[in-house]
Image: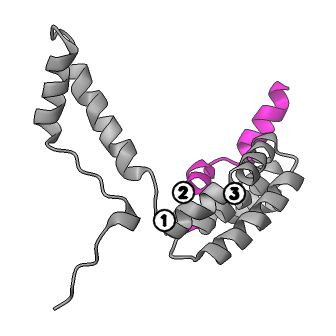
């Protein structure tokens, strides 16, 4: 087992960062190392190709029909990939397909909520030592200000003029 790890490490040496980043974010040196994993491929290249296919599904301004088509293609390729994490992801994607497409249609994502949650956690860490939850809540409100969230379907169009 140890010998196989050393061989794989030698084959993919220097390719880790180019596999983690998107191809559009690679500098010239890293872009030159990308064909090496493709040549030696196997499971590493299949995983990279599936990762990029899923990124392409949600990157950009695609409509609901295009996203549905790309999701279906991703699920079929991931199910046949023999890579257990991607097989599990394909099953979860199929299970939650209607919710995913509704989020695409409405333009809703959870990025703002995740950012707010992270800031609340940082303030909560500062609040250790306060005597009550009300004091911690007051610190959160004072630090983050009034929190107003308007869903996309509740937004009013701003008149141009």
On whether residue 24 falls in the magenta region, the answer is yes
Location of the C terminus by quadrant is bottom left
Residue 34 image point, x, y percent: 65, 62
Identify the element where label 2 is drawn. loop
Mark number, residue 122: none
Q: Quadrant of residue 155?
A: bottom left
Identify the element where label 3 is drawn. helix
Q: Would residue 133 be visible to someone looking at this image? A: yes
89 and 148: which one is in front?
Answer: 148
For marks 2 and 3, the one nearer the N-term is 2
In the rendered image, the vertical position of residue 116 relative to residue 73, given as above or below: above
Q: Main secondary structure of the magenta part?
A: helix
Q: CA distance from mark 1 to mark 3?
A: 29 Å
Q: CA distance from mark 2 to mark 3?
A: 26 Å
31 and 120: which one is in front?
Answer: 120
Whether label 1 touches label 2, CB < 8 Å:
yes
The residue pinned by badge 3 equals: 97
Residue 113 image point, x, y percent: 37, 45
Residue bounds of the magenta highlight: 1-27
- Please name the residue shown 78% across and 47% down the image: 91
The residue pinned by badge 2 equals: 21
In the rendered image, the vertical position of residue 125 relative to residue 78, given as above or below: above
Mark number, residue 25: 1
In the rendered image, the vertical position of residue 20 relative to residue 35, given as above or below: above
């Amino acid at each position: 087992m140890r010998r196989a790890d050393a061989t794989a490490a030698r084959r993919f040496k220097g390719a880790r960062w180019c596999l983690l980043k998107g191809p559009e974010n690679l500098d010239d040196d890293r872009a030159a190392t990308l064909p090496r994993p493709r040549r030696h491929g196997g499971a590493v290249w299949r995983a990279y190709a599936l990762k990029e296919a899923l990124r392409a599904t949600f990157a950009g301004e695609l409509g609901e029909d295009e996203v549905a088509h790309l999701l279906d293609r991703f699920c079929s390729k991931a199910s046949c990939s023999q890579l257990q994490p991607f097989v599990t992801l394909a099953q979860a994607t199929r299970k939650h397909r209607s919710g995913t497409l509704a989020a695409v249609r409405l333009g809703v994502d959870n990025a703002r909520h995740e950012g707010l949650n992270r800031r609340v956690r940082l303030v909560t860490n500062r609040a250790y030592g306060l005597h009550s939850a009300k004091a911690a809540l007051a610190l959160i409100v004072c630090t983050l200000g009034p929190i107003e969230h308007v869903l996309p379907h509740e937004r009013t169009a701003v008149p141009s003029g």
